[in-house]
Image (spheres, rainbow, N blue to C red):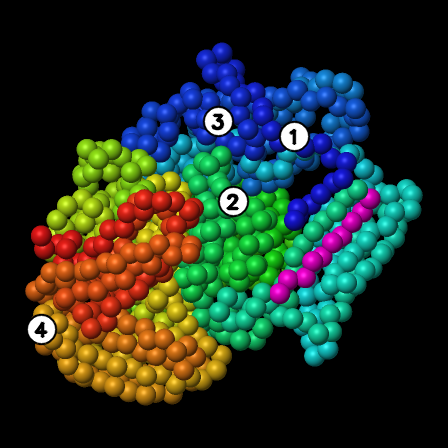
Amino acid sequence: MKFSEHANSIELQGIWAVSDGEGEHEFSMLLPGDVVSGLHEAGLIEDPYWGRNEYDVRWICQKDWILSREITLDRTELVLVLSEIDTVATISLNGHVLLTTQNAHRTYRTDVSQVATVGANKLEIRLHSITSEADERQKAQPFFIPYHRENSPIPNGNMLRKPQCDFGWDWNIALAPVGVYGTMRFEPKSDIRIARLAIEQNHGEGGVQVTVKAHLDGLSASDETVNFSLSGQSISLDVPANVPDPMLCATFDIVHPELWWPAGQGDQPLYDLVVSLGAQTEHRCIGLRTIELVSEPDSAGRSFYFKVNGRAIFCKGANWIPADALFGKIDRQRVEEQLKSARDANMNMIRIWGGGRYEPNWLHDLCDRLGLLVWQDFMFACNLYPSTPEFTEEVEREVKDVVARLHHHASTTLWVGDNELVGALNWFQESRQDRDRYLVNYDRLNRAIEQALKQTDPNAIWWPSSPTPGPMNFGDAWHADGSGDMHFWSVWHEGKDFEHYRDVSPRFCSEFGFQSYPSMNVIRTFADPEDFNISAPVFESHQKNAGGNARIAETMFRYFRFPNDFESFVYLSQIQQGLAIKTAVSHWRSLKPLCMGVLIWQLNDTWPVCSWSSLDYGGGWKMLHHMAEKFYAPVHVSVRPDGEDLIFTAVSDLASEIGLVLEVFALRMDGHSRLIANEMIDLSSDAAKEVVRTSLVAEDEIVVYRWKGSHDDTWVSDHFAPNPYKTYALQPANILTDIVEVEGGLRIRLSCEKPALFVALESNIAGRFSDNAFILLPEEPREIHFKPLEPVSNVIISVRDLHSATCA
Ligand code: BMA
């Protein structure tokens, strides 16, 4: 379904000529697209993601690039509509400049009737050198505006309204690509058009009232009608003649509304709204729900949680970064798979992080369909930004465009001013020395964003920054845990132990993460086997967080025996990532309702890189994502040591009470086990409850526990090692696999002679295992399914466990 259609428009998407204006590079490429992908597809540069090629292709962002196309027109009364022009561009038709642009987040419309001709026309988009434009703007500032030098090797990205991670990030390749990514078309020039729809819903006793305001642009001299239809009801309203920019308002009463719920809480029914005026048709999908942010002072500080349809929701999810570092490589189906993977891992929220791009309508439609709540940042991250009138006005236009486009989505939950700008005030010498100036500068821009949001959607929920303890509170939300949302980075960035996750009690942890290596299938797409070594330059260039590889290796020393070989290192990096995040999530969920949300940093990757993601570049599941499916399950049991005791806490996100059986064993690595608890518990809806307290097991024992809830008659097993894994005398498990082809994939039966920890299955081709990173016990053989992405033969499955990876 198209968001906005015009029956008589002329699409400009397709093959365009590209040149650098100096005669050095001339080629053709598909638009929408980016010039780096275009050069690669034309065979003029190597794959930018392979090896260390990044550094050889960085020159591309220093040049101007001219995109041009011949168009034959049979009429001239036209308007050019372009969105996501990246970034500073001069657009001309037949040699006449129509428009200059400087904001990749906006949509531009310009009348071409004075310069278009019937017959052949030449449309040209000159994309100006990103580096020169950024540098010039910095020079023109009344005072220096610092940017994050370690993240971004390409300087002054904060000067341009372009995805900030394009300049490099601690997980991104630095190429600052240019291109055109959005709408590209000529629309007929009309006296009047629908400029935007403002949609509101009011829930009451008698049902839901949906109000649709069509804000029109222009002046109509003759009879015209706007037709609205929603849920089988139609309303037609006449456009008043000779009234400039009129607004028409249609109200629909839905008497028996089917409510939209986040994933795990109910269904996602959607109603189609269609609004048309002449040849213009606007489509929106509407989900009926109420959303509130409850952020109020309380005994711990200040709460932060969401109520959907009056019900408090524990948000479980991850941070979303752009789908690819290069627009031209974004594959819609792959994005869909990744969002489905989020939902399959029991997530109900994504945070569209402020260092990337505003995502297209279809991605938000997907979130509506999947029941993924969207926390939407405005696109400012980790730098400081100007607050000059020109910059602020540009941002206001951007905010209005974006909010008008996205406000109506059922999934749209929260609008947040930026990512980490309050913290950034302390990161730069200039702002530390003159905090007053930079704080006022910050607040001017932040205030402008808030006002533009509220003008466009008065009902929008606003939060000034992520993280922040609350409005007008500029405190440290990285370490203080009582108020608002928190980014907890002490384990990764400060090298604290995993156990430190239990020392904080966030109200809502919107970022926390731990890195791992990408899976071997992904590694093979950028490195030759002779480079399979963690300190090989190729791996250092695919690790953008200074000291990241060392942190991964050093953490292994703390918890594990060192892996036997490179592939085992990759495996173990993913296991320890999963363990870190599981420690945090299972503890913070057990604090419910004090804590009401956890968003893992990060869901996806923009290119093949060592990072905090739970999904590999391309969408495969890392071990963390498999573990997330389990630790995010609606009913979960966690365990933590407390002095000489172990405390088991059960948590439920279900709307009704359940019965729970919990069995706990102490297990030695030779397989000897003893039962230490066996309980039946009533677990009320939406609760976390301490259910069992036992004494600590012996030094050579781990704890194995399993539970079964009355809502779902399957046993779930987990284990907890009170001591670092390196201290246990792991034994060869002699895992036997019996693999047979079944419809849709493979069935793999696994059995073993000794306990096997973190059993991981890998395949040589893309696909999904039904479970991974699990404990396998001699008395409990397992059956796992593998579903390849595409039907293939010759699948090779390999099996690893903690012993085989570290004790050869
Ligand atoms: C954060 C994010 C990103 C960054 C991540 C990992 O706080 O907002 O800026 O990539 O940490 O360092």
Tell me which segment is drawn in magenta. 269-278
Magenta segment, principal secondary structure?
Answer: strand
The span from disc 4 to disc 2 (Cα, nearest Å) is 51 Å
Residue 805 image point, x, y percent:
16, 53
SS label for mark 2: helix
Within 10 Å of the Cα at label 1, are there few (<14), some (14-19), or many (20+) other Cα atoms?
many
Label 1 belongs to which residue?
Answer: 12
Q: Nearer the viewer, mark 1 or mark 2?
A: 2
Residue at 43% across, 26% down:
40
Tag 1–tag 4 contact (CB < 8 Å) = no
SS label for mark 1: loop
Q: Of the residues shown, which amino acid type is indicated by label 3?
A: Gly
Q: How many marks?
A: 4
The span from disc 3 to disc 2 (Cα, nearest Å) is 18 Å
Label 2 belongs to which residue?
Answer: 332
Q: Is residue 20 visible?
A: yes
Label 4 belongs to which residue?
Answer: 699
Q: Of the residues shown, which amino acid type is indicated by label 4?
A: Glu
- Closer to the chain start, of discs 1 and 4, is 1
Q: Of the residues shown, which amino acid type is indicated by label 2?
A: Arg
Q: Nearer the viewer, mark 3 or mark 2?
A: 2
